[in-house]
Each structure stands twice: as C-alpha cells, then as structure tokens.
Image (cartoon, rainbow, N blue to C red):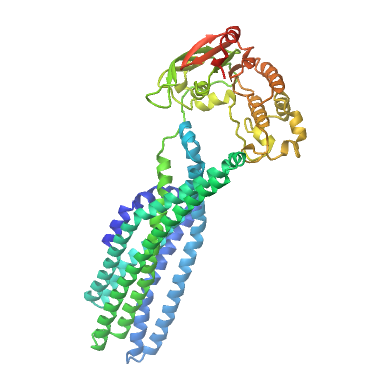
Amino acid sequence: MFFFLNRIKSFKVFIILKNLFPYLWATDKKVRFKLFFSIIFNLLAILATLVTPILFAYAIDTFNSSHSLSLSWFLLLLGAYVSVWSLGKVFIYLREILMFPVMERAIHSLAFRLFQHVQLLPFQYHLKRKTGEVTSIIETAIQSFPPIVWAVTFTLGPLIIESFCVLGIVGFICGVSYSLILAISLILYAIITHLGFMKALRSVRKANYSHVMTTSKIVDSFLNFSSTKYFHTYDFEFQKINQALQSRENIITKALIKDQMIRVYQTFTLFCSFFTLMIFTGYNLMHNTLSLGEFIMIHTYMLQFTIPLESFGQTFQILNQSFVKMEKALKTFKKPLDVKNGQIRLNRNQPLHIAFEDVWFGYEKKTPLLKGITFELHPNQTLAIVGETGSGKSTIVSLLLGFLQPWQGRILVNGHELKDINQESLINSIGIVPQHVTLFNDTVAHNIFYACMSASKKLLLNALTAANLNKTIQKLPQGLETIVGEQGAQLSGGEKQRIGLARAIIRQPKLYIFDEATSSLDSKTEKKIMKNIETISYNSSSIIIAHRLSTVAFADQIILLENGVVKNKNYSSLIEEAQTAII
C-alpha cells in the first residue's frame, strides 16, 4: 500500500481532489445532504463486505460442531449472511443514486467556471488560441471529472480501507502468518502497478496531446471551409487530416498496448499470491490448525480482493488518463484573467474625452509598433485615423478598450487613467464596428440585440434604417428571425458589416468606433451609411479607421500613422499627398 499511496501522491491526485472538492461541495444544501449520505452508504457497503465472510465462516463452523443448538445457529447465521450481503448491494446502489445528482451539479459548475475563465482571459490569449483545442479542453475536463471522483471515492478509497481491515481481521482470527501473506501480495501488486504506470505515463500524455491536436486541426479545417472551396484544396486538407489521424492512431495504439501489458503483469502477480495462500491454508486445514470456516473466510476475502484488484489496475489506468486530461484544464485556471477592476465608473450619459499621451506599444518586445503616440479627441468630435495596413490603427482601438496594455505612456478618459477605470463601464459607453464582424449562429434580431439586450423595438427599427438594412431584411426568408449560420456564413460580407453597424447603433453609445466599417460595401451604400453615421453620431464622439479618404472627409481631426508615429493632417493635405500613404 505504501507504493500505491506514493504513486497516488506522485500523480498529484490529492491536489486534484482539493481543486475539485469545491465543485462537489455545492452551495445547495440538498446537494450537500446527498453527498454526505452517499459517503455514509459507501462506508456501510464496506462494512457489509467485511462482515459477510466472517458470518459465512461462523455458519460453516457451527454446522460442523456437535452443539445441540448448532442447527438453529447455523440457519440464523446463514440468514444473517444473506441479509448483510443483500444490504451491501443495496448500500452500493443507494450511494450511486445519491451521487448522480451531486456529480452532475459538479460537472455543471466545473464546465461553467472553465468556460467563464476562458472568456475572461486576456485579448492576446484569444488571438493566439486554437478554437478546437479550447473546446477539447472543456470537453475532456467534463469527461475526466467523474472517473477521478468515482475512482478515488468508490474504488480506491474502499479498497484501501478494506485492505487494512482484512489484514487485521485475518491476523486476529487466524494468525499473523496469514495476514503477512496477504500484505506481501498487496505490496507486490502495488509495486507492479506503480512501475508499470510510471512507464506508461509518458505514452498516455502523448496520446492525449495527439487527440487534442487532431481535434483542433479538424475544427480548424471546418472553420475555414470557404478557403478550401475557393481554392479547391480538398486533397491537401484530406491528406493533412489523414496524417494527423494516422499519427494519433500510432501513438494511441502504443499507449493502449503498454497499458494492457500492465494487466498481464498484475494477473501474474495475483496468480502467484493466490496460489501461495491456497497451498498454505490448504496444508494447515489438513493438519487441523485451521478450521473449515476460517479456510473459507480467507478464501472469500482473497476472492473479494481479486475482483477489486483487477479493477484496481483498470481504475488506476482511468485515473491516470483522466488526470492527464484534467491537467490542461487546471493549467488554464492558472492563466491570469483580464478583469479590470478599476474603482472609477463612467457615467454612460456623460460625453467622453479621450487622450493618448506618449503611448508606446508592440506585440514583440524588441519591435515597437506605436512610438510615442499622442492625440486628443474632444466630446462630440470625430477623429479619423488613416495609414497603411499594419501601421497600428486597430491596435489603438484595442488599447483604448483596455484589451492591451501600453508599454509606456498614459491613456486618459475624462481625465482618468484607463487602468483606474472600471472596464465594464468603459465598454458600456462605447459602440464598435470591428473590421471583421463576427455573428452568432442565431437570428438576425438576436445578433443586433446582442449589443443591447434591453433595447426597444423602436431602437431596432432606427438601427436598421441607419445601417441601410431594411431592404436586406425584407429579402431574407424569415426576416429578422432568419438564422445567419455559423459566423454569419449565409450572409455576404456587406450584410454582416451592416449588421455590425446596426449592433453599434442600437447601443446608443457616447463614443462610436468604426474600424473599416464600410470596407465591404459598395460606394453607393457606403455614402448612404456614412451620411447616417454623421447623423447618429451628432451628440457622440467618433473614431473612424479608414483606408479610403472619402470616408473621413467630414472628420474634425485626421491623423496619419507612419512608422508608428502620429502626423496630424487635414483632408486637403491628404488629397495632395501621395496616395501611397493609404492603401
């Protein structure tokens, strides 16, 4: 058992259980009540398992005695034996019936918290993450949680308790030598399991990683189905996924073979132990140093151990695999969140005054993208930012929203440093149309209302008109209730961009940010929408990021980004300058 416990410790199972216990010990008193009595029934089931061989042994010895009351006692002991055995089964069923709702509540809590944690991770994490890998982490965490709890609570825990109790019972009734043989058998079994799983651990980790990466590649391929169809690269995708599946097949096959070989070693160990014990007890039975009832009791205990010990190997294998799968979830929880808890809350109805003061930033430490950016946006004014692709225009927006942190300098909103402002209150004052509009696989109405769940139908109609969406909605088969498909796949780029516009407009913010908001529109529609933008942003500030000069002609202030440096311009000077500064 020492080696077994040492192996458990090396697996960090105690740490895992410490992390998982809060999910089991729910705040709901009814769930706690069920967990408590599930443990009670588990202990009663263990007690029944320990008592039944003793009752049967005494029944046999009573039958062989010459006492006048032996027949009555024999029948009474047999009845008690069957009753306790049956109760033990009932206790097992009851513990599981009570544990099912506890487990499902715990899975619910774990999955929700993991989803919540991933959503709140920093902006840069989501830029680098792989969707398939993240979904696989959540899926495997949900799948791994029950085996860990079931294995430790209802298999390994009872086995350890029963082992020590049986050694004491056999030693007390039959003698220390019998307990010694059982103890050596258990220790040898634990050593074999320990060494075998130490050898197989690396293979299991590789197998799990291979499965996650294969799933990630398949999801990534589905997400980019349009590129595959545009360039007819089916053969390349088929070959790539086939190679990934082939690699997964080879790695997992090796891991499964290693796991199965451990069972062969375990079975051989059990054979040697059982053979030795039976020869020893049989010899003592023949020489009358052991009664028939005691012989049967020891034999029964050994059989009771054999089944759990065989499942012990399988349970330990499942525990091993589940722990490896749970590792990524636990590592994900360790990633710091991107929650800005500034104490200053902005008034949603108050105009915004934005100022960048000597702001430096870059995605790579040695390569600054923005070099001492300084500009100011007064309330109810429009600021246009133009520049080449990759000059940092969208990065300025991410900095303003608090998604990225500047290396140096300050960003001020209404005279307060951005780090001191509550991020939620800041976001609630801003309506943004990103360069790439992402939509949920839901209705058009849902995607627009998503920016302001409490918006009225009147605001929705105004947003549709301002975004020039009315005709598009009329053409859709179910109007506003039309499902847009995954990532808006059933809509054109222009239609998605106009939904993005409507989503920002319905929010009625004090600052609009249009990041290439009309890049997917034709010039006629663009002019209509830009005119509407002038109207809707009359009492709000606006930041317009654009490539085409025609979209920023009405701006109060225009800045040109060149090599990470701001240059103040006006519309006339930009027209006169070489158009190469703007793509």
* Residue 26 visible in the displayed image: no
Residue at 42% across, 63% down: 42
The answer to which image quadrant residue 183 occupies is bottom left
Q: Residue 557 appears in which quarter of the rendering?
A: top right
Quadrant showing the N terminus: bottom left
Can you tell which quarter of the image residue 492 is in? top right
Q: Quadrant of the C terminus?
A: top right
Q: Position of residue 55 (x, y in %)?
A: 37, 79
Q: Is residue 275 above or below residue 520?
A: below
> At 27% across and 86% down in the image, what residue appears?
285
- Relative placement, left or right, of 187 versus 408 is left
Q: Nearer the viewer, residue 58 or 355?
A: 355
Residue 201 point in image, percent of width and height: 35, 55
In the image: residue 223, left or right of residue 462: left
Which residue is at 64% across, 37% downward?
488
| Left or right relative to 474: residue 74 | left
Q: Position of residue 371 (x, y in %)?
A: 43, 16
